[in-house]
Amino acid sequence: MKKYGFLTVLTLIVFCMTAAAAQAHMLWLSPDKTTPAAGESVEITIGFGHHFPHGKMEKEGRLKAVYAVAPDGGKVQCKAQSPASYTFTPKQEGTYWLFAAMKPGFVSNTTQGRSLGNKKTLENVVSCSAFRLSAMTAVRCGKADWKAAGTDAFDLKLMPVSDPADLKKGDTIALQVLFQGEPLAGASITPSTAVHSHNEDGGHGHHGGSGEVETNADGIARVKLDSDGAWMFTARHKRPYPEKKLCDNYSYCTTLTLNL
């Protein structure tokens, strides 16, 4: 009986560790052009998975919105070509910010495995999260000045403090995390780069730069860039879910992709 109890506890611990890792899905945006001319179509690849830049959104109906915000503040809807591909055509000179969000939902760890659902729709729930996944990136049309993104796109937002256009390998980028429009202190930012997408042993990996960093009282953190090319920065935040009988916490994850 004692042996059975120990094995059960051990199994649950291993399961919870595995499930926690499995939940680390990310949504990201990869435009095929970051400096298009006015009237030139831009194709946006919707990335989804654990290892940037590998993985694409494969299932239809999972995205809540994909759109661009023009330099004048107007919203431009992006046209779906497939679950993993959207297009839009910039017509003004300036910075276009691209946004995407998945439909919100619940994911739970149960004694039988990990499933979509909450404490009321599933049995034997060990823990439940109400997930909110979002992504953003920018393209610059023409030679207009840089323009920062507005603060009302998502609850959790991650953006560069200043124009990243002149950054290169060896420089440091300053990033700010906002939650519901206010700076978020103590948030973790994980840098990822295509250069670090494979470990030396041939396995997948996604960390780059100086490793995970934490924001200060102003919601700002700095990451040293150890390579050129495509980068993704991931911010995560949790807060208690108000109805504990339904779920345990909100789990927010947002990404910012930049091509340096």
Image (cartoon, grey):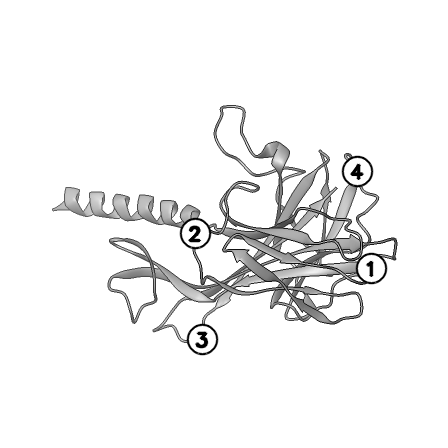
Could you give the CA–CA distance between mark 3 and mark 2, rounded to whole angstroms? 21 Å
- Dot 1: few (<14), some (14–19), or many (≥20) neighbours within 10 Å? many
Q: Residues within 10 Å of mark 2 (few under 14, many from 20)?
A: some
Work out whether mark 4 precedes mark 2 in sequence or the reverse, and give the earlier one.
2
Label 1: element kind = strand
Which tag is nearer the camera, tag 4 or tag 3? Answer: 4
**Marks 1 and 3, Cα distance to the nearest angstrom?**
41 Å
Q: Which residue is mark 4?
A: 168
- Alpha-carbon span between mark 4 and mark 3: 44 Å
* Residue 61, x across and y down, in percent: 45, 63
Which secondary structure lies at badge 3?
Answer: loop
Identify the secondary structure beneath mark 2. Answer: loop
Give the residue type that dot 2 points to: Gln
Position of 138 compared to 82: left or right?
Answer: right
Locate residue 207: give its quadrant: top right
Q: Quadrant of the C terminus?
A: top right
Q: Which residue is the site of mark 2? A: 23
